Amino acid sequence: MKLGTSAIIGGLLFALAIFVGLFAPWLAHTDPVMGANLMNAEEPPSWIWWFGTDAQGRDIYSRVVHGARISLTVGIVSQLVNSIIGVTLGLTAGYWGGWWDDVVNGLTNLMLAIPSLIFALAIMAVLGPGLTSLLIALGLTNWSFTCRIARASTLSLKSQGYVQAARVLGYGDLRIMITQLLPNMVGPIIVIGTLGMGGAVLAEASLSFLGLGIRPPYPSWGSMLSEARDQITTAPWLSVFPGLAIFLTVLGLNLLGDGLRDVLDPQSRSRRT
Amino acid sequence: MTTAPLIEVEDLRIDLDDGANHVAAVEGVSFRIDRGETFGLVGESGCGKSITALALIGLLRRPLSVAAGAIRFEAREIQRLSAAEQRALRGNRIAMIFQEPMTALNPVSPVGRQIAEMFVLHKGKSWREANQLAVEALASVRVPAPERRVKDYPHQLSGGMRQRVMIAIALACDPDLLIADEPTTALDVTVQAEIIELMRNLCAERGTAILMISHDLGLVANVCRRVGVMYAGRIVEERRSDDIFSACAHPYTQGLVDSLPRLGSRAALGRSRLREIAGVVPAIADFPAGCRFNPRCAQATEICRTTAPETTWLGAGGLVRCHHHA
Ligand SMILES: Nc1ncnc2c1ncn2[C@@H]1O[C@H](COP(=O)(O)OP(=O)(O)OP(=O)(O)O)[C@@H](O)[C@H]1O
Ligand code: SF4
Ligand SMILES: [Mg+2]
């Protein structure tokens, strides 16, 4: 198995983001919310204030570091929920077919017809802002690609000899799905999941920017951008650093997803021996 | 005195219904296999051997279905069993190995795990016990260093090794019947012989009955005590293997026998082909009226084109379906 350059760069960026998120309390210089001190308001980046400070004198570096926690939690958890929903629906629809397949197809087409951000926006409007509603809104609205992939993989895997053989050996439906079908489609599912995670980080930022996600003063990258809106000319560092954090994380996830696609491609799998 | 057969197929008819056509792909097929016995089904491609085998384990799907007749395993009718009861038979009491050892194993699962799964599924073993039994199962099919091989993935094994693994999986639960559908067609000749020998010995040791399916009359006659010759969805002749070369009664069987290379040159030529019978098997939708072999038969007369021949019982449990049998 040989990882390409893009997978390595993407993986390192994502690993960095995870590291920062995990060790945020140790990496941060000050408390991201309470560490306000009007004496240090709107300091530009310097040796003391790496990323500068905001109008309340809070350290932007510390806030970006803590923001990683929220952005990554939302990205990972919501995409995990999406993957589980998508795989469950796609796998069962492809395997059983019939009316259940029609139902799942209808749902998938519905989800694909409505932009998922609009859908999430509507859910947020009903549930109100906050981390939990963000997880629900983003976790329920972006499973259609995973579902499609899982269904298509199931349809092509179903006629494979080993799936037929499993039936002959007395495997039940559930056992066939779990042992024969699922492990043979994890590659594309992981690729879609990685790319979707990047999408979820971006969606969290968008919703928070619109004031529907994480509310200030809690630092998510999106809410920080939202707060920095008015000072973009006077204190550009307020937008640049959270923006950079979003950019690098999403770039990392996309590179990783693309790189994994090359590695996990079923054809390259059968070629390596 | 006769004991109850292990499996008994009576007047089986399998229909193919794909919307446009509704035709019988298999018709009037009857045979029985006793405990520990070996029975072979021979015939050209498309004559219905594989779908007959699938019917035996209750796995005919969608366009195909059992339309008439009965299949009794230990006097219980397979079609009357619930889905769960059928699953409990499959892989446990009736096992099956296929032509394609390349594709019949899950590529992302170690072979040991695939063997162990059978013990977990059918014998209620823990994974720890099952993994131990998997090593023993691999050893029993003469795979060298089984404790290391269990961790291998299918792509790390040769075709012959994979077919051994398939046999280990099939025989894991000590089934009463092993169905072998062209088990060696995809392998080269020397490996073929080893695999057949292994399968035959293991089944003989354990008293497992074999239903062997193949194009190759020579191979089947060599492995099985009795042979059923199928043509276009019907069994046209059933004989003891000892009799089939010397005294076959059906013109089609005679054609098969004649198309076999002479003894000795067989191994050199590999699998026998049925080139010497002129013509091809008709597609299901255009089975001719009367005897289905009549367009290709040299002995065909008027009655062959209008009336399907009845079964004629020969001595020693043999039967033939031909108006002008030898
Ligand atoms: N799933 C299916 N749908 C439609 N027709 C089928 C299906 N499976 C088998 N058939 C048809 O049923 C007939 C018998 O098929 P079967 O597979 O039993 O032949 P066979 O004797 O095993 O041939 P081979 O030696 O090539 O394996 C064939 O004409 C085939 O086209
Ligand atoms: S019944 Fe007639 S056509 Fe059929 S095999 Fe016998 S002789 Fe030939
Ligand atoms: Mg076949």
Image: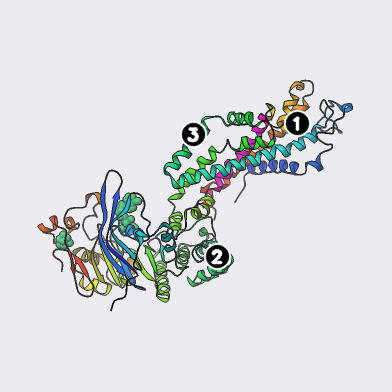
Contact between marks 1 and 2 (CB within 8 A): the answer is no
The residue to which callout 1 is attached is A241
Q: Position of residue B29 (x, y in %)?
A: 26, 61
In the image, residue A191 lies at what x, y percent? 58, 43
Label 2, secondary structure: give it: loop
| Residue B60 place in picture, x, y as percent | 36, 55
Tell whether A163 sits left or right of A20: left
Q: Quadrant of ligand 1?
A: bottom left
Q: SS for tag 3? A: helix
Which amino acid type corresponds to the residue marked 1 in the rendered image?
Answer: Phe
Q: Which mark is residue B150?
A: 2
Give the spatial CA distance, label 2 vs label 3: 44 Å
Same chain, labels 1 and 2? no
Give the residues in magenta: A185-207
Residue A193 inside the magenta-drawn segment: yes
Residue at the spot x=50%, y=69% of the render? Answer: B137
Question: Callout 3, which amino acid?
Answer: Asn
Disc 1 to disc 2, how far (Cα)?
53 Å
- Which of the marked residues, 1 or 3, is nearer the chain's N terminus? 3
Give the structural element (helix, strand or loop) at label 1. Answer: helix
Q: In the rendered structure, the residue with mark 1 lies on which chain?
A: A
Q: Taking the image as drawn, is residue B218 in sight?
A: no
Q: Does residue A225 appear to the left or right of B292 in the view shown?
A: right
Mark 2 touches mark 3? (CB < 8 Å)? no
The picture places residue B37, in percent across and down from the top left corner, at 34, 73
In terms of depth relative to the viewer, which is nearer, B260 or B244?
B244
Q: Residues within 10 Å of mark 2 (few under 14, many from 20)?
A: many
